[in-house]
Image (cartoon, rainbow, N blue to C red):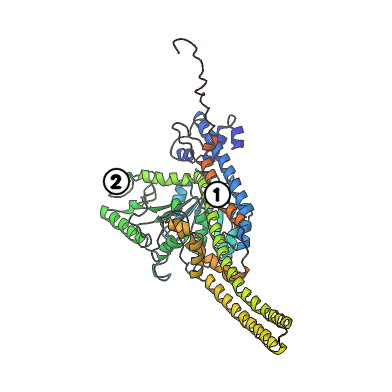
């Protein structure tokens, strides 16, 4: 942005390029309209510069809090946060495109970027995750080279194994109509509903609650692609700024892998998920459209147990429909006139894609809030379980120590009182035997207590104790968040044992809670737009209002008429 500012007067094209990278609204105008004049670009330049600076400030503060406070505690407690959060973040905002094969993902990418990059076809044409990024020259990088680059932020994908590394690639392209963001194309989902086992069950909260509000179901153990496809989609969707899920009229939501992706990989990202029924220009009659749309709603209702389904964008791309229509031509269908009204829907979808840079700030803050809440809940419940076990251990071993010390005490008392040594020794021996029996009983009791606390019911009891206030107030977010992190806590307890859980101080818990209750709201206020008509800015740019004059010392009038 600074470089573009320096070149603004000498070379307007540099400023245009900067605006396309930084201002999504201007990028959309560049695609659908003529080139704006430098005078019209000046306001966008100031807005783009402020937006870029705001994103840098938010990113710096979130990374500082994450690296200094959250990650060390998470590593010590085997918490729910990803172990590779300390790796560099993805440098550009990106949009993830998912869907069945031949649903129009590749054609949509070519349409938005203004040039042919992805091969499109009815049959599956690509089995890779393709990351398309802007650059000065066209170049391609394979999976190991791309994922291994420490500056691109995709290093954690190595955990999914070499099977994924052979099915991911980077395409850097120049001369794109939209700059400043990346698009990620995914392999088409092609299995039948029964190929992956039983159909996914409906889950409360799917696409119907706040971010992170609920527990994703267990992923399918099938690795038909050679890697955990649903896990990779989950990783990319959590970090994406916009997620587009495409359906086509031939397969309106009937593939089992697509439904499982909705219930597992896309769980909790409904705030950035957009469902699209594409290629509606293929319908010849209105009842064909109604049948396909109803079929899609019926299939989505199986995994979205809500009365109101999310919005489904119905659109088509000009020039890619049946009949060989050229770009910009009217759709070759009996529904040509009604379909022309869907041009606005396509523009809305494109606008959502171009809003990815604006969403980046909100997504960074949201991820920080989720991380703080999850880690605080994990540590609070783990500390309660450790405290219960420690309290039971103190009771059991105190009884053993009392019995063990009672024998010598009785022997000393009997000798002091002049009692016969035989009975005194017998009583002391009996106390020692009782102490040994008590020690065996204590060991077994502690083992049972540890096993009980490590179960789902035991950890649920600890959660209900530590979050009784939230549950009493009906906080569904806390209950659903617990369902999300409880598997990781059970794994941590089973791995190290409840007696070896590290202790978490009250100060550490308070600091993590402060991140969610104080730091995150401050970041929200800093990035939120000022609600003043006629001025689009952020609250961080708002100056304090001038103090009004004191009523006790009003300013004197300048004339009698003023008085």
255 relative to 23 in the view: left or right: left
* Residue 133: mark in rendering: 1
In the depicted structure, whether residue 28 falls above or below residue 172: above
Q: Residue furthest front?
A: 417
Mark 1 or mark 2, which is nearer the start of the sequence?
Answer: 1
Q: Is residue 145 among the parts visible in the rendering?
A: no
Q: Quadrant of residue 500?
A: bottom right
Q: Are marks 2 and 1 in contact (CB under 8 Å)?
A: no
Q: Residues within 10 Å of mark 2 (few under 14, many from 20)?
A: few
Q: To which quarter of the image does residue 17 belong?
A: top right
How busy is the neighbourhood of tag 1: few (under 14 within 10 Å), some, or many (20 plus)? many
Question: Considering the numbered disc 1 on the image, is that residue within a helix, a strand or a loop?
Answer: strand
Name the residue rendered at 53%, 51% in the picture. 369
Q: Residue at x 57, y 59 (%)?
A: 81
> Can residue 531 be seen here?
yes
Q: Out of 149 and 76, give the one closest to the viewer.
A: 76
- Horizontal and vertical percent for residue 63? 60, 50
Question: Percent from the top left, x then y, of residue 48?
Answer: 54, 37
Furthest residue toward top: 560
Q: Position of residue 391 (x, y in %)?
A: 59, 68
Q: Residue furthest bottom?
A: 422
The residue at 52%/20% (across/down) is 553
Assign the C terminus to one quadrant of the image: top left
**Mark 2 — residue?**
338
């Amino acid at each position: 942005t600074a470089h573009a500012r320096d070149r603004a007067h000498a070379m307007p094209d540099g400023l245009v390029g900067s605006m396309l990278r930084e201002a999504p609204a201007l990028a959309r105008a560049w695609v659908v309209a003529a080139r704006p004049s430098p005078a019209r670009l000046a306001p966008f330049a100031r807005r783009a510069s402020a937006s870029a600076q705001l994103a840098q400030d938010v990113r710096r503060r979130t990374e500082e809090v994450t690296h200094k406070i959250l990650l060390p505690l998470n590593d010590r407690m085997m918490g729910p946060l990803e172990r590779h959060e300390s790796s560099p973040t993805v440098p550009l905002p990106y949009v993830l495109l998912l869907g069945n094969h031949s649903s129009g993902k590749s054609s949509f990418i070519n349409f938005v970027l203004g040039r042919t990059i992805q091969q499109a076809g009815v049959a599956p044409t690509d089995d890779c995750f393709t990351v398309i990024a802007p650059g000065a020259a066209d170049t391609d990088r394979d999976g190991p080279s791309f994922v291994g680059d420490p500056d691109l932020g995709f290093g954690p994908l190595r955990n999914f194994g070499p099977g994924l590394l052979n099915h991911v690639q980077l395409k850097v392209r120049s001369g794109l109509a939209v700059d400043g963001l990346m698009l990620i194309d995914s392999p088409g989902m092609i299995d039948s509903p029964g190929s992956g086992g039983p159909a996914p069950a409906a889950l409360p909260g799917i696409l119907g609650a706040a971010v992170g509000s609920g527990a994703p179901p267990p992923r399918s153990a099938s690795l038909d692609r050679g890697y955990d496809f649903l896990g990779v989609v989950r990783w990319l969707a959590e970090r994406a700024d916009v997620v587009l899920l495409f359906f086509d009229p031939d397969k309106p939501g009937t593939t089992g892998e697509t439904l499982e992706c909705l219930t597992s990989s896309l769980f909790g990202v409904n705030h950035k998920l957009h469902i699209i029924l594409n290629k509606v220009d293929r319908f010849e009659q209105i009842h064909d459209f109604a049948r396909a749309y109803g079929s899609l709603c019926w299939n989505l209702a199986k995994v979205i147990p809500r009365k109101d389904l999310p919005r489904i964008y119905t659109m088509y791309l000009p020039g890619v429909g049946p009949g060989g229509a050229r770009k910009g031509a009217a759709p070759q269908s009996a529904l040509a006139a009604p379909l022309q009204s869907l041009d606005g829907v396509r523009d809305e979808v494109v606008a959502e894609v171009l809003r990815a840079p604006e969403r980046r700030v909100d997504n960074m803050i949201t991820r920080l809030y989720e991380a703080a809440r999850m880690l605080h809940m994990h540590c609070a419940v783990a500390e309660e379980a450790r405290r219960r076990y420690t309290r039971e251990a103190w009771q059991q071993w105190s009884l053993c120590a009392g019995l063990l010390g009672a024998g010598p005490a009785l022997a000393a008392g009997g000798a002091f009182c002049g009692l016969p040594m035989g009975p005194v020794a017998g009583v002391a021996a009996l106390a020692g035997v009782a102490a040994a029996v008590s020690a065996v009983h204590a060991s077994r009791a502690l083992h049972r207590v540890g096993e009980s606390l490590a179960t789902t019911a035991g950890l649920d009891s600890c959660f209900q104790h530590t979050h009784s206030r939230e549950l009493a107030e009906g906080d569904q977010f806390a209950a659903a968040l617990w369902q999300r992190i409880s598997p990781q806590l059970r794994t941590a307890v089973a791995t190290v044992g409840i007696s070896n859980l590290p202790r978490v101080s009250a100060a550490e818990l308070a600091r993590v809670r402060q991140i969610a209750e104080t730091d995150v709201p401050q970041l929200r206020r800093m990035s939120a737009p000022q609600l003043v008509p006629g001025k689009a800015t952020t609250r961080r740019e708002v100056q304090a209002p001038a103090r009004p004059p004191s009523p006790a010392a009003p300013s004197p009038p300048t004339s009698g008429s003023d008085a």
